[in-house]
Amino acid sequence: PFIQYVVTIFMFLAGTNFTLSYLALRGNFRSILKDEEFKYYSIITIGFTILVFIGLLLTTALGVEQAFRDSLFQVVSIITTTGYATADYLTWVPILAMLIFSLFFFGGSAGSTGGGIKIMRIVLLFKNSYYELRRMVHPNAIIPVKFNKHSVEPRIITNVLAFFMLYFLIFGLSTVIFTLIEPSMETAMGAVATSLGNIGPGLGSVGPADNFAHIKPIGKWFLSFLMLLGRLELFTVLVLFSPSFWKQ
């Protein structure tokens, strides 16, 4: 247990922006506590841990300490895309497995070792959706989206929205394609989501208690491409397939 808690701490730190790590080393902790992305990153991690912890207490015979440790370790490992596992979350009740699966689409902070969509993009998406409702109520009001007390340019919001649409479009199409290789929809969704986000464990036959060894060679090539696509950011890789890029 002690080793697992130590590993959890460093997984969490690796999922934060390295700029904050630099500020921490210099003793500037006030800037860290004021950072909006770090706040949401911490809130999401704590929130999911509490939900899974309560679920484990209600549906399993685990003791309080082990239930908390299993929930904390799995949540931090998945959201930081570290890929470690100390428990098979597929043996938990379906709602808890779905909570873990939803974390596949979060990722760590911008400027961290984490993959995935990134917390900053998710925060900007929800903020823009909230402010869009306010703009509908007050059509003449100018309500900019702010992050860390700074207004976010509309083109950045557009870029975030385009990223989300492209990410989930690729996830959906890739899942359908992968079912031709692996008939199980659960396995296909888990394999595609974990590859795009560079998570590690997935669902079905590629869960935390299994591996990808049984996947056919063509499936491994396909998932390898998705891992590259997700790790290097979607636009960075997809722009290589644009004829105008090579003309320049």
Image: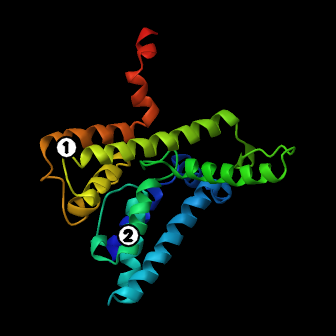
Would residue 187 appear left or right of 141 to someone viewing this image?
left
Relative to 239, residue 243 above or below: above
Please state the horizontal and vertical placement of residue 150, each as a whole percent of the image. Answer: 74, 44
Residue at the location (78% across, 50% down)? 136
Image quadrant of residue 170?
A: top left
Q: Amino acid at mark 2?
A: Phe
- Quick one: which residue is furthest to the top in this view? 247
Please state the horizontal and vertical placement of residue 11, each as a whole percent of the image. Answer: 41, 60
Identify the element where label 1 is drawn: helix
Residue at the location (46% across, 32% down)? 235
Of 32 and 39, nearer the camera is 39
Labelled pair 1, 2 in contact (Cβ < 8 Å): no
Please state the horizontal and vertical placement of residue 137, each as a whole percent of the image. Answer: 82, 53
Q: Which mark is residue 21?
A: none
The crowding category of the residue bearing disc 1, from other C-alpha atoms within 10 Å (few below 14, some 14 to 19, many at least 20), is some
Residue at the location (20% across, 38% down)? 221
Of 94 and 237, nearer the camera is 94
Identify the element where label 2 is drawn: helix
Please state the horizontal and vertical placement of residue 217, each as a whole percent of the image. Answer: 13, 42
Q: Amino acid at mark 1?
A: Gly
Residue at the location (59% across, 50% down)? 23
Q: Which residue is mark 1?
A: 219
> In which quadrant will I find the N terminus?
bottom left
Q: CA–CA distance between discs 1 and 2?
A: 29 Å
Give the mark nearer the N terminus: 1 vs 2. Answer: 2
Q: Which residue is mark 2?
A: 73
Image quadrant of residue 94?
A: bottom left
Relative to 41, residue 112 above or below: above
